[in-house]
């Protein structure tokens, strides 16, 4: 009898309305929450720009440091460019091309070995990876459901609705919108942004994930480390809810 194909892993592609909205923070906290269930977790950051891969504050290195002691979590990166510009231009600057097929193959191979798969995007969904392919194409080709990380401040309603529209156009399954209180916008703006995104979205809206000052402390001294802030957020009801949705997804 021929081998049965392996079931696709449960997982999520963590995208955002923009760069710097909290994709790495959410990916890290979600990875912690999922590994607590005893399953294995593969975390992929396929493209990163702006920092050398071994720079302690690069996304890849932050995730590797956080999960170094967790034997059921693997973190992998693929393309890393020091130039702090969009991936297509960063690759050109270093005379390289991003191969989306290579990213897909790396993710598929990685996924075979894990119960849960988390992929962090780069910037927002229309960020170009090659001359003809952007992050949205990668999401659609991967076939994972998508989580949209959005800010709670002014401007986020427009960015969130554009992102929803763009993903829908490509037929991507949207797991939900995660509102992240990552900046210090005025309270009335935060409240009304959250209210209107909830009111106008027809996908699950989770959060807001609270502002966590330790993520900003930028120190290696406990308990003010980035890792300690992530551990706190991993126990928040917003992250627990997303972890439940990933576990129960088909
Ligand atoms: N809930 C929060 N409370 C406080 N700070 C936060 C929160 N979420 C994110 N941050 C901080 O905001 C900054 C951006 O977050 P993060 O690196 O996760 O964004 P990103 O979307 O992954 O960015 P990139 O596009 O560079 O990958 C970081 O300094 C992070 O620690
Ligand atoms: Mg990031």
Image (tube, rainbow, N blue to C red):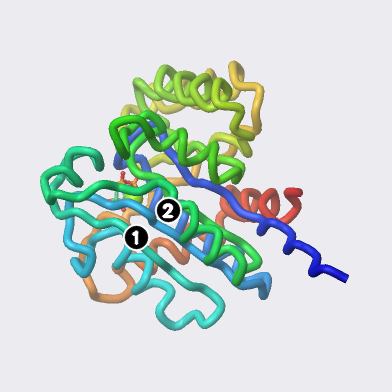
Q: Nearer the viewer, residue 192 or 114?
A: 114
Crowding at dot 2, Cα within 10 Å, few <14 / some 14-19 / many 20+, comes out as: many
Identified at 32% across, 63% down, the residue is 60
Secondary element at image label 1: strand
Q: Which mark is residue 103?
A: 2
Q: Quarter of the image containing the N terminus?
A: bottom right
Q: Nearer the viewer, residue 112 or 218?
A: 112
Q: Is residue 245 above or below residue 28?
A: above
Q: Is residue 250 above or below residue 123?
A: below
Residue 21 as seen in the image, left or right of residue 105: left
Crowding at dot 1, Cα within 10 Å, few <14 / some 14-19 / many 20+, comes out as: some
Residue 7 as seen in the image, left or right of residue 157: right
Counting residues from the start of the chain, the first of labels 2 and 1 encountered is 1
Distance between mark 2 and mark 1 Cα atoms: 7 Å
Identified at 30% across, 76% down, the residue is 222
Identified at 29% across, 56% down, the residue is 79
Task: Give yes or no for contact between labels 2 and 1 (Cβ–Cβ under 8 Å).
Answer: yes
Residue 94 as seen in the image, left or right of residue 59: left
- Quarter-wise, where is residue 6 in the image? bottom right
Q: Which mark is residue 43?
A: none
Q: Is residue 145 visible?
A: yes
Q: Which residue is mark 1?
A: 78
Residue 162 as seen in the image, left or right of residue 221: right
């Amino acid at each position: 009898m021929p081998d049965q194909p392996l079931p696709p892993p449960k997982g999520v592609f963590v995208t955002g309305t923009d760069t710097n909205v909290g994709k790495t923070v959410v990916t890290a906290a979600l990875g912690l929450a999922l590994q607590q269930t005893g399953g294995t977790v593969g975390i992929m950051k396929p493209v990163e720009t702006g920092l050398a891969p071994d720079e302690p504050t690069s996304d890849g290195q932050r995730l590797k440091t956080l999960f170094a002691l967790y034997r059921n979590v693997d973190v992998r990166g693929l393309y890393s460019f020091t130039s702090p510009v969009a991936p297509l231009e960063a690759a050109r600057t270093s005379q390289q091309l991003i191969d989306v097929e290579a990213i897909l193959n790396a993710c598929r191979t990685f996924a075979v070995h894990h119960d849960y798969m988390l992929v962090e995007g780069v910037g927002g969904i229309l960020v170009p990876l090659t001359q003809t392919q952007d992050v949205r194409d990668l999401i659609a080709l991967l076939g994972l459901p998508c989580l949209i990380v959005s800010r709670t401040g002014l401007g986020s309603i427009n960015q969130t609705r554009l992102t929803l529209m763009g993903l829908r156009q490509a037929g991507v399954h949207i797991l939900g919108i995660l509102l992240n209180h990552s900046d210090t916008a005025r309270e009335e703006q935060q409240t009304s942004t959250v209210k209107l995104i909830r009111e106008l979205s027809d996908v699950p809206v989770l959060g807001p994930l609270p502002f966590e000052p330790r993520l900003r402390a930028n120190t290696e001294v406990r308990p003010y480390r980035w890792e300690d802030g992530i551990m706190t957020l991993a126990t928040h009801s917003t992250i627990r809810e997303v972890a439940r949705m990933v576990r129960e997804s088909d």
